[in-house]
Amino acid sequence: MCQPIKPNQHKRPIRPPEKTHRAEGLHLSRRSLLQYSAIGLANLALAACAQRSATGAPKPSQSGGNSNNSVYAPILATVSAASLPSFAAFADQVKVMSDGTYYRIESNGLPTHPMMIGIRSWQQQVPLPQPFSGSNAFSIPIKPILAANPISARTALYRGAIALAVNGIPIFNALNNRGDDAYVFGELDDWGGHCGRADDYHYHTAPLHLQTYIGVGNPIAYALDGFPLYGLTEADGSQPVGLDEFNGHGDKDGSYHYHATTTYPYINGGMRGVVQVKDDQIEPQPAMTAIRAAQQPLRGATISNFKNVDINSYALEYTLNGKTNYVNYHFEADTYTFEFIDANGVRRIEVYKRKSR
Ligand SMILES: [Zn+2]
Ligand SMILES: [Zn+2]
């Protein structure tokens, strides 16, 4: 059942479309759908297969039938991220599982690379860990399907993530929730990210810097329709040819994938594959829960420094009217302590608790 895939054949479908496969909740004729296998994630399936053969075939279980509180009870044994070419480089940050329909990917939402520096339009939000685990993990379809009616991110999907980077950080629409190009408006740091109203760090452009760890031949992200997002070039370094309005294209093997670009749409320009959308947001995807009220934009503020000074401790500096201000914060279990020091040295402490989900 599990077909081995040679290295570097990551763009090939693993297996032909299964006759019994149907897109849940969609009533498109099977003939109108083309089914593809995700690129790097295919290797995860192989790892899962290996796990199954090693431990015996697990019994399929119904949602919620597990003692943990996940509604997506894994029916396959937990798969080590080390078995995936892209996720492997971030195995200490992401945990990959499968429930048979979706790859379920957990992370704490905090990248290990520097953050925040370079932001010229700051909303006063900072990166805090997010509970992207259990029933609140990310969901990537195991078997992506091209949609009969793709969704353009120019006019939709302004809420929530549209892709997941392989370091476990969500990627949002390149346009912010007001429809502005977040990069052009100076809202992003030098790594293409910033923090949302729940102090959730996410990218709006392609995290090409991840290629330092994974090389150019592996995906830097997966769109939430399951199709992979590659960097600016093909795996062999050649320029992508014939990108569609979604920044993607098919290849001779019958697969489809997206590419990053240095201009809009930067990332996948929408959903070329089948997804379910509710209130302009792809579902399922993790809920972002804020520990404090959403902050306001701070006009004229530029973030000049940001450091991870100790375990779970960060120090942010921003300049406003030529003077330096500081935000230091620390978190321990569910408690978040902020220290604000303004340009006059006035200090203020705020403490918040994250409510358990
Ligand atoms: Zn954002
Ligand atoms: Zn390509």
Image (cartoon, rainbow, N blue to C red):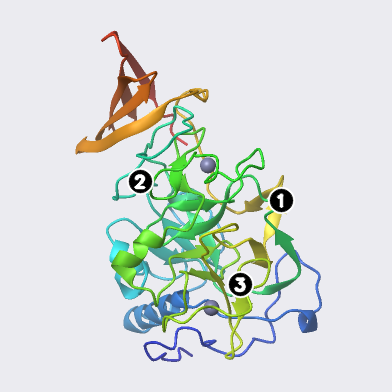
Q: Residue furthest left?
A: 310
Q: CA distance from mark 1 to mark 2?
A: 26 Å
Q: Is residue 326 above or below residue 194?
A: above
Answer with left or right where residue 172 lies relative to residue 84: right
Q: Identify which amino acid the numbered label 1 is placed on.
A: Ala
As drawn, the label of residue 248 is 3
* Residue 194 in the image, given as x and y percentages of width and height: 45, 41
Does any atom of ligand 2 lie closer than 8 Å to the CB of label 3? Answer: yes
Contact, mark 2 vs mark 3 (Cβ under 8 Å): no
* Residue 238 in the image, given as x and y percentages of width and height: 46, 82
Residue identified by numbered label 2: 110
Residue situated in front as seen by the camera: 322 or 156: 322
Q: Residue furthest front?
A: 322
Q: Is residue 9 above or below residue 197?
A: below
Q: Is residue 231 above or below residue 317?
A: below
Residue drawn 47% across the image and 79% down it: 234
Residue situated in front as seen by the camera: 159 or 299: 299
Q: SS class of the residue under badge 1?
A: loop
Residue drawn 53% across the image and 64% down it: 261
Q: Residues within 10 Å of mark 2 (few under 14, many from 20)?
A: some
Q: Identify which amino acid the numbered label 2 is placed on.
A: Leu
